[in-house]
Amino acid sequence: MEKKIIDLEDVKIISRLHIIELYSTAIKLGLINKNKYSKITYPLLLKSISLLDRLSRFDNNQETKNLVITLCGILWQYRNPKWDLLHESLILFLSRIGYAPSGILIDKEYDFNEKKHSSFTSYINQLYISMYNENYEIEVLDKKFLLTEFQKKVWDEIDKNRVVGISAPTSAGKSYLILLKTIEILLRKEGNVLYVVPTLSLISQVSNDFNQMLKDFGLYNYSVFNTYSSDKAQDNNQIYVLTQERAISAFSQEKNPFENIQVFIIDEIQNIERVDSPKDTRAKTLFDLLNEYRHNSSANKIIISGPRIEDIGDLGENLFGVESMEINVKSSPVVNFTYSIAKQGKAFLFKQYSDFFNNPISLRITNKEIVGYGGSMYNEKFNDFLYEIISKLGSDSKNIVFAPNPKQARNIAIGINKERDDIEQLDEKIILLSEYLSDSVSDNYSLINVVKNNIAYHHGKLPHHVRFVIEKAIKEKLIGNVVCTTTLMQGVNLPTQNVFIRNPNLFVQRKKNSNNPTLTKYEIANLSGRAGRLLKDFIGRTYILDEDSFKEDSHNQASLFDKPNKKLNITYANRFNSNRDEIINSLTKNTFGEAEEDKFISCYIRQTILKYQDDSITKLESTGIKITNEELVEIKSNLNELNVPVEVCLKNRYWDPFDLDKLYSELNKIDIPSSINDGEAANKLFRTLLYLYNNYHRYYDRYVKIKLDNPNTQRLLFSICITAIKWSKEVPLKQLIYDHDEDKIEDLISNIQNKISYGIPVLLKPIYDMVNEEHSFLTFMEMGAYKPITRKLIEYNIPRETSVFLSNNYLNSDNFESKEEIIDRISSIYDELNYWIQVQIEHIL
């Protein structure tokens, strides 16, 4: 351990406290029976207080702050109940280092209304704490908020700068601060907000957070939208919470779709990392969105945010072309311990990894018979082991278990679904939740049973309404054990104290001669950061259940679970320059001879030139693509030969203009469906997709990804087409599920979410643009709704299944002209609804 302000005696104190945490955790998990280091003695307490007093007085760097909060967390966790005044000292230390909100968790009598600590026995301490806290207090519309030093810096720098880049661990409270600051800005000056998030789960979470805060501050004139409509483009008081795909599609409708934007927020910016990868369309979409925004729109404030992003200020400047303020913090106001189980010969070790020591502290596991270790298969032995240690933590513990894929997440949840002695009686809300899942999905849905035992699973194949209610149940602490896939790394805020990771594999069974993906150190650090949340938990713990599966060639054990920053490459320069001659030759000669993985670059250049003409060189340069004036002239000359309308090309940016031109010339060969009530709609849809598969396979494969090389796969696609029409006609999900096999149920849900609601409409959009056909057919398919009232409810961030239910049962006979009329009607029947339907609509009431 580096020692700048500590000596050998201090190291002994730090080591002793960490050993107490190690042994106490091991005995709680049932790994050992005796804890010879179970207590903090009074002499050790005095030495620890003295050390903390000294450390907290220094002009602390992030390492010192991390040490202070860690020692405070251990002292508080294992305190003697007789130490009545300990909390006063710890609150003082935390206030000194700018972590005052963590002190709130220590003060059981903290007044949340007045934002004041309880009375202290020491008036001097109380005075000092008030003085320190005053530096980090803010006021919004007569409401006081106590921030960390990091949060206060973000707050102030947003006022001073147009573009701010924020890099911080997942538990630092940056999302909450950004939301609060946005509200404060809107209170000062009305306008619109654009908030871009990577996933549908985050759309729901951020939208609900916004709706709640708008209510708290009386901003009832604002509406939160999850889709863009050009009809509302000129309005003020709009808050758009969109994925990058939905946001960029707005630029296909309008040159400047987002006007009078007060705050533009891009969360989880690390998703832009693989922008030059041919297969990562989502990263390219985000990058292209930010470029569109840079050249065609403006915002008073731009905020980019992500966990542990290196040089995030430079990133902001590169993306938006203006100087960007960087706020980068590595320490967190939440204590986070990483533990692992490792094999040593025939013995097992329990290890504690710490930022303060070069090597982990370890103990020998004496109850090794419970350990399910090694291999990548998730068998009964592993499930029994996982169940055993989770049970030891008690029913009040909130745990997340990482799983490599959706099927395994479900299987783990089922595997640990056993009767629990510590659950005496089911909460009525859990009974209602189980019934609601059966009524709205399938009687055979595994979640129906596992939720009764304090368990759920969370992955990308959950329907929107199921994700919503499961996340709500977790936040209400009705469910304590959640098995998650990588959805957890995309910012979904599921409060938890413990994260369990078996191994870094994103597969269950290794395949020969194949890429077997694994989590990176950066991704593991983000998963670990989910353990413990600001103002929720003082200490979070990550448990690595198979250390050997993480080991590298490095002999430095301390680096095994370190928390690296990520440096983002956000240009097309590398991809373009590596094959420049071939790409330019293809563009100037129209030879189409570039490699398949470079076709997106050629498409991007052509689309940019069509849109910006003589300004294209500057626009392309901002993305790392440099072409000469002579090359521009040649490419423009070729583009002048296009017959397809330019506006069709610009509305379909990921199609090469010459492919669109070919498609335009073949329209007489394609009979697209124009109405969901057409008896031939499913057949027409299937034939159109089959034509695109045969003639435009690159685009078909990008969005649909079903090979049609045999009768079985053709039957599958036709089945999806039938489901698409039923989905568009508002047939409830439960009626669409015709198979009791849960793998097939989840495949159906995945096909609805990825193909019917997204892939197929995006693939077909160019054809509808060309024939000037109304896009209602595609809109109905995307939303899973055709009635105006149902679509309005979905636009208000009410999940599709719930919107269909309300439309069919309560809103079908009346013509509602305004949102207020809809709210009045829903309010009148609110008490009749299942609790889990109520929680999905309460944000609009």
Image (cartoon, rainbow, N blue to C red):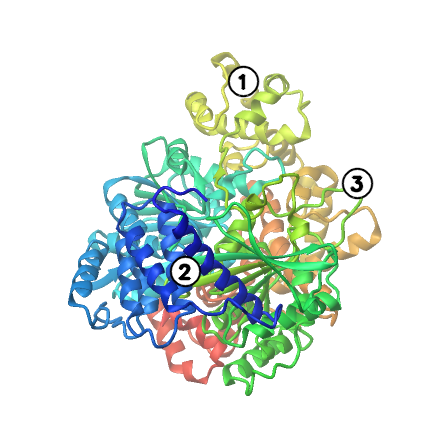
- Label 3 or label 1, whichever lies nearer to me, is 3
On the image, the x and y values in percent for residue 537 come to 42, 65
Q: Quadrant of the C terminus?
A: bottom left
Is disc 2 surrounded by few (<14), some (14 to 19) or many (20+) residues within 10 Å?
many
The answer to whether residue 771 is visible is no
Q: CA distance from mark 2 to mark 1?
A: 46 Å
Between disc 3 and disc 1, whose residue precedes?
A: 3
Of 570 and 437, which appears nearest the observer? 570
The x, y position of residue 40, in whole percent, is 42, 67
The amino acid on which the numbered mark 2 sits, given as a three-letter code, is Ser
Q: Which residue is mark 1?
A: 637
The residue at which mark 2 appears reads as 207
Q: Which residue is label 3 attached to? A: 513
Where does residue 302 sit, x and y in percent of width and height?
34, 42
Label 3, label 1: how far apart the Cα atoms are: 46 Å
Residue 431 picture quarter: bottom right
The local crowd at label 1, few if under 14, some if 14 to 19, many if 20 or more residues have their Cα within 10 Å, is: few
581 on left or right of 610: right
